[in-house]
Image (cartoon, rainbow, N blue to C red):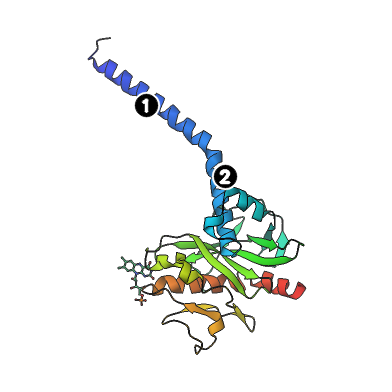
Amino acid sequence: MHKDSVQRTLLVAFLLCVVCSIVVATAAVSLAPVQQANQLLDKRKNILVAAGLAKPADLTAEKVDELFQNIELKGVELATGEYVDIDPDYSIQEAAKDPELSHKLSAEEDQADIRRQPNVMPVYLAKTEDGQIDKIILPVHGYGLWSTLYGFLALEADANTVAGLGFYSHAETPGLGGEVDNPKWKAQWPGKEVYKDGEPIVELVKGGVSEQTPNADYKVDALSGATLTSRGVTNLLQFWLGEDGYGPYLKKFRQES
Ligand SMILES: Cc1cc2nc3c(=O)[nH]c(=O)nc-3n(C[C@H](O)[C@H](O)[C@H](O)COP(=O)(O)O)c2cc1C
């Protein structure tokens, strides 16, 4: 075959494509377990930080494993509030796409603007050394301005007082809605309450919260310049704490403890 022939050029291009695709496919397959391990580590870090059980800077992989020894994963059937078996790899995103594992919310029900809701949600129970439940960590999600925010709301064992709130995934604007990640804003959450007379009234309020604000214990400053993200956070919290969310479970939890 002549050095400058069309056939030879095509053959070289073809062989190059084959070699490159083998390299890429091998890298993708061999790195998949590492990616999965990193995703799990990241999720666990978010749970621990949201619950106020650790600071992000202190969380090495070993520390995460150690702290997770005291955290139990449970499945909760939202409609009944009962515990059910759950796969450790259960994904709320995947469940929400599966018609057998989730249901469509009506416009009236869909306060968090999520369209479909898994029938079963994972909850994480953080326990003390002597096995007592110390914190209940609930995955929450809902729409802000640009994106669905995914995070964890941690409650104390009274199933009413907030231990912490943190979001691990969203695409709100940095400096505006993205301030949900600001440690100063997040520091307002621990100690706040969520239920008044059984209703989830916790909310973000524009203009800030002072001691004079009525029901100040249930309120946190809205994010400045981000009324729509703030409204989304209020909506998602009230939705997940309400009758269509963890409401039945948390009510049962309070009665049984
Ligand atoms: C480029 C751009 C990005 C914005 N990002 C957000 C955001 O992430 N969250 C939000 O609530 N508002 C965002 N806004 C502002 C909203 O459009 C709206 O003006 C704001 O929510 C009103 O809040 P305020 O009443 O506190 O000013 C953005 C505006 C612009 C121009």
Residue drawn where x is 52% and y is 43% of the image: 35
Residue for badge 1: 17
The amino acid sitting under disc 2 is Ala
Secondary-structure class at tag 2: helix
Task: Mark 1 vs mark 2: give the one in front.
Answer: 2
15 is higher (above) or lower (below) than 180: above
* 178 relative to 3 in the view: left or right: right
Residue drawn where x is 23% and y is 14% of the image: 5
Image quarter of the N terminus: top left
Q: Position of residue 65 (x, y in %)?
A: 64, 50
Q: Position of residue 183 (x, y in %)?
A: 47, 67
- How many numbered circles are shown? 2
Q: Position of residue 112 (x, y in %)?
A: 50, 69
- The answer as to whether callout 2 falls within 8 Å of ligand 1 is no
* 157 relative to 111 in the view: left or right: right
Nearest the eye: 52 or 80: 52
Q: Quadrant of ligand 1?
A: bottom left
Nearest the eye: 237 or 42: 42
12 is higher (above) or lower (below) than 1: below
Mark 1, residues whose alpha carbon is within 10 Å: few (<14), some, or many (≥20)?
A: few
36 is higher (above) or lower (below) than 167: above
Q: Position of residue 79 (x, y in %)?
A: 66, 67
N-terminal label among 1 and 2: 1
Residue drawn where x is 56% and y is 64% of the image: 50
Residue 51 in view, yes or no = yes
Q: Residue furthest top?
A: 1
Residue drawn where x is 57% and y is 68% of the image: 164
Secondary-structure class at tag 1: helix
Mark 2, residues whose alpha carbon is within 10 Å: few (<14), some, or many (≥20)?
A: few
Residue for badge 2: 37
